[in-house]
Amino acid sequence: MNFEDFVKAYWKGDLYSFVIEAITFYEMDSTIETEEMNKPLSFLYLSSIAEENMLSRLIHIGTEYADIEAAFNGRVIRDY
């Protein structure tokens, strides 16, 4: 399944669910973790440059965000 088809099939308007679905579908090692502060904040932990590029491309196709960094408001931790 190419990225455009994936977006058509799985984009339901919820960014976090979409990213989790992409991580699961493409069997990525990246994760989303929610930390409790004044309000819950979600952080994306990326495990490789390839996964970052794939998620950025999917986000760009399915949303108005330019990349994964913009979609998560800078709450991206690169662990590679």
Image (spheres, rainbow, N blue to C red):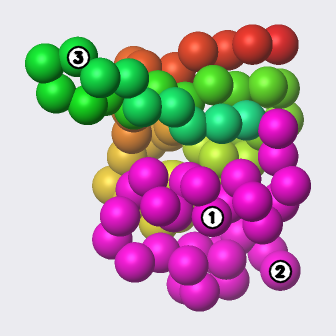
Check disc 2 and report its element: helix, strand or loop: loop
Task: Point out which mark residue 1 bears.
Answer: 2
Do labels 2 and 3 touch, CB within 8 Å? no
Report crowding for label 1: few under 14, some 14 to 19, many 20 or more residues within 10 A (C-alpha). some
Report crowding for label 3: few under 14, some 14 to 19, many 20 or more residues within 10 A (C-alpha). few
Task: Point out which mark residue 21 bears.
Answer: 1
48 w.r.t. 37: above or below: below
Residue 42, quarter of picture: top left
Which of the two discs, 2 and 3, labels the residue nearer the N terminus?
2
Residue 49: percent from the left, percent from the top?
A: 80, 26
Residue at position x 71%, y 53% in the image: 23
Residue 6: within the magenta? yes
Residue 16: percent from the left, percent from the top?
A: 44, 52
Residue 75, quarter of picture: top left
- In the shown orientation, is residue 39 left or right of residue 15? left
**Magenta stretch, overall SS:** helix
> Could you tell me the amino acid type at mark 1?
Glu
Which of the two discs, 3 and 1, labels the residue nearer the N terminus?
1
Task: Point out which mark residue 4 bears.
Answer: none
Residue at position x 52%, y 31% in the image: 33
- In the shown orientation, is residue 35 left or right of residue 47? left
33 w.r.t. 7: above or below: above
Residue at the disc numbered 3: 37
| Gap between marks 2 and 3 measured at Cα | 38 Å
> Could you tell me the amino acid type at mark 2?
Met
Residue 25: within the magenta? yes
> Could you tell me the amino acid type at mark 3?
Met
Magenta region, residue range:
1-29
Residue 66, quarter of picture: top left
Which of the two discs, 1 and 2, labels the residue nearer the N terminus?
2
| Gap between marks 3 and 1 measured at Cα | 25 Å
